[in-house]
Amino acid sequence: MSDYGRPPVHPSSPADRCPSVANVVARVDGGLARVKVPAGRLAVTALRAVAGAATARAGGVIEITGRANLQLRGVHDPAGLAADVAAADLTAGELGDLRRGVVAPPLAGLDPTALDDPTPLIAPLLAALGAAPELDRLSPKWGVTLDAGGAWPLAGRRDDVVVEARGGGRWAVRTAAADRVVGAAEVPAAVVGAAVAGVDRPRTTVTVRGAGRATGPLGAGPGRGTLRRWWGATPWLGRLTAATAAALADAAEAAGAAEVRLTPWRGVVVATSAPLAVDGLVDDPADPAAGAVACVGAAGCTSGLADAPADAAAVVAALRRRGGPPVPFHVSGCPKGCAGGTAVARTFVAVAPGRYDVLDGTGTVVARAVPPAGLEAALP
């Protein structure tokens, strides 16, 4: 967005290093660890294990990232956390996790309007990436996005490789260098080939075609085939308390679901015939909280210039008082733009202590140095 955000960097650059279970990074609020969740599919048993680890090994809060992974903040027992994550089968090792960066539609196999079902691609793709040790030199930020169109496309997202449904079992494998249309069985090899071509080179990304959605699947909706219904919700600003995560795992399991799907909109989806009731989750698309995104801000990051979560919460409260339809927005505590990635009407970027530049949906700056009290008025 505009001149804000982080440009592509070479894999060897310190700016390209990411937190992980093996690389817990020090932050203002303690250690930060990221758990890769391939394609956003998380077994209820694994979610319950992460909730326990967040309580015992960290600060009790679990963030859902814009790539449908999990982050634990305030980590004070990295070795114990690593053991818990390994016991829950949530890591393939430090190098193996680098090759698990696959984002998939959370309604895969559920959305009756999708051009195709990417579900059969996911396991073979992950297996092919996992069996290619030459990819160990990829940037930790390297990734693949699968997009099947439908009601909640991943359009507008950027990634190193984009795989887009073309209908009739055909998929376009796209990189910044080339586009190639292949059959479903050829997708894993085509993606691995594109990945190998990018080893030891500066990252280049490509954008998923089309117009994106500002919020993910919320409420209940119709499914397809044997998966007749789904339920979607979002935690407050993309952050689950350990208690909410454990309650979600219990509710999903009681409803007969074996997994919870994380979404790139920092929400969750469960294939279930009836809505779930879980305190701490918002499933009403008319609630302004459903479209609010914020980074951790100054309370957890040395780059933070403002209390982004508190300022976002104040805007949500103001929108609730105002009434009317929700207005999706993103609050970033510094110009890096962390926690972004979805289509929003306004982005508030802290550029000085307690002061925000305001960007519209195209990334154009429309106001500068706005105090937190003026953010709600800057919304359309």
Image: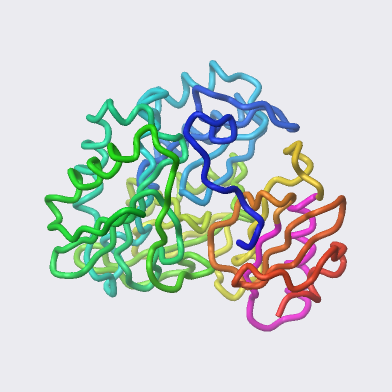
Q: Residue furthest top?
A: 79
Q: Is residue 60 above or below residue 283?
A: above
Image location (x, y in percent) of residue 319: 74, 74
* Magenta-drawn stretch, dominant element (helix, strand or loop): helix
Q: Give percent across and percent down for residue 51.
A: 53, 36
Q: Is residue 141 magenta?
A: no
Is 218 located above or below residue 52 in the figure?
A: below
Q: Is residue 319 magenta?
A: yes
Is residue 253 visible to the viewer in this orientation of the structure? Answer: no
Indicate the position of residue 152 as horizontal and vertical percent values.
40, 69
Residue lying farthest to the bottom in this orientation: 324
Compared with 272, 377 (above or below) is below
Q: Is residue 374 left or right of residue 359?
A: right
Numbered circles on residues, count: 0
Quarter holding the N terminus is: bottom right
Q: Is the residue 355 above or below the residue 50 in the image? A: below
Who's the residue at 30% across and 68% down the image? Answer: 111
Q: Which residues are magenta?
A: 307-331
The image quadrant that residue 113 belongs to is bottom left
Which residue: 38% across, 57% down?
106
Q: Is residue 236 visible?
A: yes
Q: Nearer the viewer, residue 7 or 240?
A: 7
Location of residue 95 by image quarter: top left
